[in-house]
Amino acid sequence: MVVDGIYYALGLVAGGGLVSWLARPLWALPLFVLAVFCLWFFRDPERAIPEGDVAVSPADGKVVAVKNEPGGLTRISVFLNIFDVHVNRAPIGGKITGITYQPGKFLVASREEASTQNETNTFIVEGDGARVVFKQIAGLIARRIVCWSKVGDLVRKGDRVGLIKFGSRVDILLGSEWKTAVTEGQRVCAGSSVIAHRLRH
């Protein structure tokens, strides 16, 4: 579990206890329910990381777009609702060569415009001649992007790199060295779902 969930839950339980003491215990029930939800929301299960020349999804959620982008890139967009695990993972192993934060709007993350207009945190990971760019994108409810990594860090495929709180979106940009392995509407899991196979020339 991500430690943030414990802090949120403790605060809500304390608030519920105060409401119970000052008023009626029943009025505190919503706070206790929210405390349980926070513990569940910030879960961080272990994942079986696939081997081989593959890229894995950085996020749990639903693939809402697989589109061609300028420069011969393919963009895969994954939408996370509030019931998905929100810990983000490295899609490939290698070195983090760039992290760029960009302020922006908080549009509903499932909308196409969210890819370009919302607050984002962009990672570049390079390793073994391959390169993957992926973006943590805040949504209407998720208004905080958490980054646990820094430029220069070496990561393994599937390593935890950050978190987006309460509903969000992740975009993955793949170059011509990758063959996409997912389709729109497909559900994926961070670290364990293969989203692309690397082509060797």
Image (cartoon, helix red, strand yellow):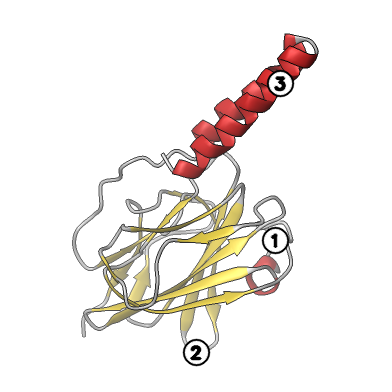
Between marks 1 and 3, how big is the CA–CA gap?
40 Å
Residue flagged by tag 2: what amino acid is it? Gly
Q: Which mark is residue 71?
A: 2
Q: Which numbered circle lies on residue 111?
A: 1
x 62%, y 57%: residue:
144
Foreground: 106 or 20?
20
Q: Are marks 1 and 2 in contact (CB under 8 Å)?
A: no
Along the polypeptide, which appears first: circle 3 or circle 2? 3
Q: Quadrant of the N terminus?
A: top left
- Picture layout, residue 9 above or below residue 169: above
As helix, strand or loop, the secondary structure at mark 1 comes to loop
Foreground label between 3 and 2: 3
Residue type, numbered disc 1? Arg
Residue at 25% from the left image edge and 64% from the top image edge: 156
**What residue lies at 58% left-to-right and 37% top-to-bottom?**
8
Tell me residue 163's x, y (percent).
49, 55
- Label 2: few (<14), some (14–19) or many (≥20) C-alpha neighbours in 10 Å: few
Is residue 197 toward the left or the right of residue 118 in the image? left
Tell me if residue 96 comes above or below residue 165 in the rendering.
Answer: below
Evaluate if marks 1 and 3 touch, with contact meaning CB atoms under 8 Å apart. no
Q: Quadrant of the C terminus?
A: bottom left
Q: Is residue 107 left or right of residue 71?
A: right
Q: Secondary structure at mark 3?
A: helix
* Residue hosting label 3: 18
